[in-house]
Structures are given as C-alpha cells and as structure tokens.
C-alpha cells in the first residue's frame, strides 16, 4: 500500500462513544505521529476532571476552555488529535480546524454508541431523565456540523490492523483528490 504523506494534523471528531480515542491511538502507531486527546489536555490545563468542570462551572465555561485548548492544538505540527464530541460545533474552532488540519468524522451505528455510553457515567450531557432520547437529539443536532469534516470514516473494523489499513486507504483517496 502507498503510505499517505501527512503534512497536517489528523483530527478525529464525532459523537461520544464512537471510539475516537482508541482510533487515535491506533493511528498514532500506524502513522508514527504523536497522539493528543483534547479532553485529557483540557483536564491537564484546567486541573479539573471534565465532570468537575461541568458541575462546578457549567457547560458554558467548559466550552470556553475547550475552545481555547482545541484552537491551540490546531496550530501544532502534524499530530493525531481526538476531540470531545462537542468541540467541532463552535464555528470559529470548526473553521480553524477545516483550514489547518484534516478533519475526520468518526461514526458508528447508534446502538453501538448507546451500548458504550451506557457502560459508564462520565458523560455530563447524558445525566438526564432519558439519556437515549438526549443522545438521539444530540446526534440529530450535530450531524450538519460533523458532516462538514473532510472525511467520513465508519469505524467498524474487527482488528487494529484492519482499522489502520482502511483508514490509510480512505485518507490516500482523499489526498489524491485534495492534495495539501
Ligand atoms: C462531550 C463529549 C465528551 C466531553 C464532554 C462533552 C460532548 O467527550 O468532551 O463530556 O459534548 O459530546 P467524548 O466525545 O470524548 O466522550
């Protein structure tokens, strides 16, 4: 396989539970590029867990910190970057990412997302009476933004190797039509 030549960061975005962090780690190995998880970076700079940020300061303040962190990450030399599910909704952040990086909407079927997010309680946005309805609503609201990403990757391969190979093929096809 021809290895795609990477000159920009690869930014993974999409709903919680689609496997952005795991995919990011795989791609970090596959492309030999450093990996950064934006939520971990937010926790590092704010000295708070994401759940604490939401509880203590509210979603608005969390989004402010997220915006600052992600816009800084967008300026780095090529990395693999995984975003939290809401980061790409901010217009300024989205425009910077679309210009400076290659953005990838990572997607899996709804049932897979729901099963995964139901296994843990670390998602503040899903602490509602009906998490399933909340999740469905968030997906509908966010699709128009996610679909602006350069690449739409369906993350449903059995193994790490198959995932990396499928991703490389899709990226190569994208770069052939959109050299950067
Ligand atoms: C959020 C997703 C979370 C985290 C925060 C808000 C969202 O990240 O940033 O809880 O708005 O969808 P993951 O997508 O990594 O779960």
Image: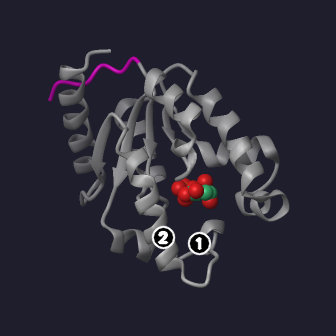
Contact (Cβ within 8 Å) of mark 2 with mark 1: yes
Residue 17 visible to an observer of this rendering? no
Tell me if 89 is positioned left or right of 168 in this view: right
Residue at 18% over, 29% down: 173
The circle drawn on residue 126 is: 1
First reached walking from the N terminus: tag 2 or tag 1: 1
Q: Which residues are magenta?
A: 1-7
Tell me which secondary structure the magenta stretch mostly adopts: loop
**Quarter of the picture holding the N terminus:** top left
Q: Residue furthest right?
A: 56
Tell me if 129 is positioned left or right of 43 in this view: left
Residue 125 visible to an observer of this rendering? yes
Q: Position of residue 106 (x, y in %)?
A: 36, 50
Looking at the rendered structure, the secondary structure element under dot 1 is helix
Residue at 64% over, 76% down: 127
Q: Residue beneath label 2, please?
A: 135
Residue 173 position (above or below residue 166): above
Q: Is residue 173 magenta?
A: no
Residue 93 position (above or below residue 113): above
Check the image and tell me how it is coloured.
one colour
Q: Position of residue 72 (x, y in %)?
A: 65, 27
Q: Position of residue 149 (x, y in %)?
A: 37, 38
Residue at 42% over, 77% down: 115
Tell me if the residue at label 2 has its CB under 8 Å from ligand 1: no
Q: Residues within 10 Å of mark 2 (few under 14, many from 20)?
A: many
Looking at the rendered structure, the secondary structure element under dot 2 is helix
């Amino acid at each position: 396989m021809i290895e795609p030549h990477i000159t920009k960061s690869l930014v993974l975005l999409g709903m919680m539970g689609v496997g952005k962090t795991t995919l990011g780690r795989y791609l970090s190995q596959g492309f030999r590029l450093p990996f950064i998880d934006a939520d971990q970076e937010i926790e590092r700079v704010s000295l708070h867990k994401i759940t604490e940020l939401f509880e203590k300061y509210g979603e608005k303040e969390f989004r402010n910190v997220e915006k600052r962190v992600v816009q800084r990450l967008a300026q780095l030399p090529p990395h693999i970057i995984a975003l939290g599910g809401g980061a790409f909704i901010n217009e300024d952040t989205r425009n910077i990412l679309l210009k400076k990086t290659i953005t990838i909407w990572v997607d899996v079927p709804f049932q897979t997302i729901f099963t995964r997010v139901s296994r843990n309680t670390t998602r503040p946005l899903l602490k509602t009476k009906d998490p399933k309805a909340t999740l469905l609503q968030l997906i509908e609201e966010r699709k128009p933004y996610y679909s602006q990403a350069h690449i739409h990757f369906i993350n449903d391969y059995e193994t790490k190797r198959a995932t990396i190979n499928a991703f490389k093929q899709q990226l190569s096809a994208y770069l052939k039509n959109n050299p950067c």
